[in-house]
Image (tube, rainbow, N blue to C red):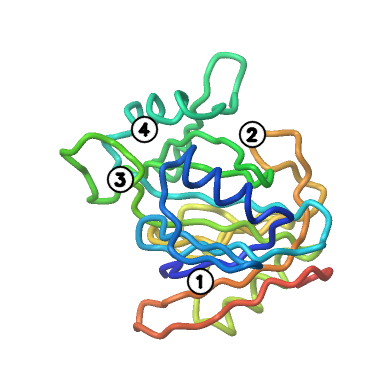
Amino acid sequence: MKIEAIELLSNNIIETEQFYNTILDIKTNSKSENEVSFLIGKTKVSFQKSAVQDPNYHLAFDIPNNKLEEAFQWLKKRTTVLPVTTNSQFSSFEAWNAKSFYFYDNNGNLLELICRFDADNQSNTTFESSSILFASEIGIVTSDVLATAEKLISQYGLDYYAKQPKTENFAVIGDENGLLILVTPDRNWFPTTKKAQAFEARVLLSTADGAKQELQIRNQPGN
């Protein structure tokens, strides 16, 4: 599964454009009075102006798996990298064979740059914004994780991520190229103390058979 495009809500389109242009050095792809979009690697990420109070999301972006430390040094010169433990700003997911680090954008979206060591995506070039490969994760907040997961699996022809056992408050759908992270509102977004909240979004997916499908994430219990 691949995440081709993501459409999120934002309270401030102007500040969003400034953050992605200036802090992340990502050029504007298109904009209007009520929308701004960026091409982050292969994924189009758009923000729609909204009166909904403080909409925020969790997104992860893959980077070459030999560029973790270099990417970290690049980013920490530009913005604050969040602590994962008292001694480290890196997370380590042993079951996933992955490592990552986290930061916020101007909207309070929790962003993650992640290396998946089972992927064949090494790079020999110096890390910069163009080194980001694609959006590989988006969080979905729902009061009934397993019911929502089964609905998504049935509707979009997906499956649970083989490396992550499902629980009643956390489940992961997809594969190494794209993951839907399902959580309940009582969970904190790792590695923060910020509670997950449900906000509307749209995600364009392409599945293994090449089909493209639009996923509507709705701000409703159970999605």
Residue 133 location, x and y as percent?
34, 53
Q: Which mark is residue 101?
A: none
Q: Which residue is under mark 1?
A: 159
Q: CA distance from mark 4 to mark 2?
A: 19 Å
Residue, disc 3 = 131
Label 3 to label 1, Cα distance in Å?
A: 29 Å
Q: CA distance from mark 1 to mark 2?
A: 26 Å
Nearest-to-viewer mark from 3 and 1: 3
Q: How many residues crowd around disc 4 within 10 Å: few (fewer than 14), some, or many (20 or more)?
A: many
Among the 4 quarters of the image, the one containing residue 42: bottom left
Screen quadrant of the C terminus? bottom right
Up-down relation of residue 191 to residue 157 (above or below)? above
Identify the element where label 1 is drawn.
loop
Q: Is residue 106 left or right of residue 214?
A: right
- Spatial CA span between label 4 and label 3: 9 Å
For discs 3 and 2, the disc positioned in front in the rendered view? 3
Q: Secondary structure at mark 4?
A: helix
The amino acid sitting under disc 4 is Ala
Dot 3: few (<14), some (14–19), or many (≥20) neighbours within 10 Å? some
Query: Quick one: SS at disc 2?
Result: loop
Residues under labels 3 and 2: Cα distance?
A: 24 Å
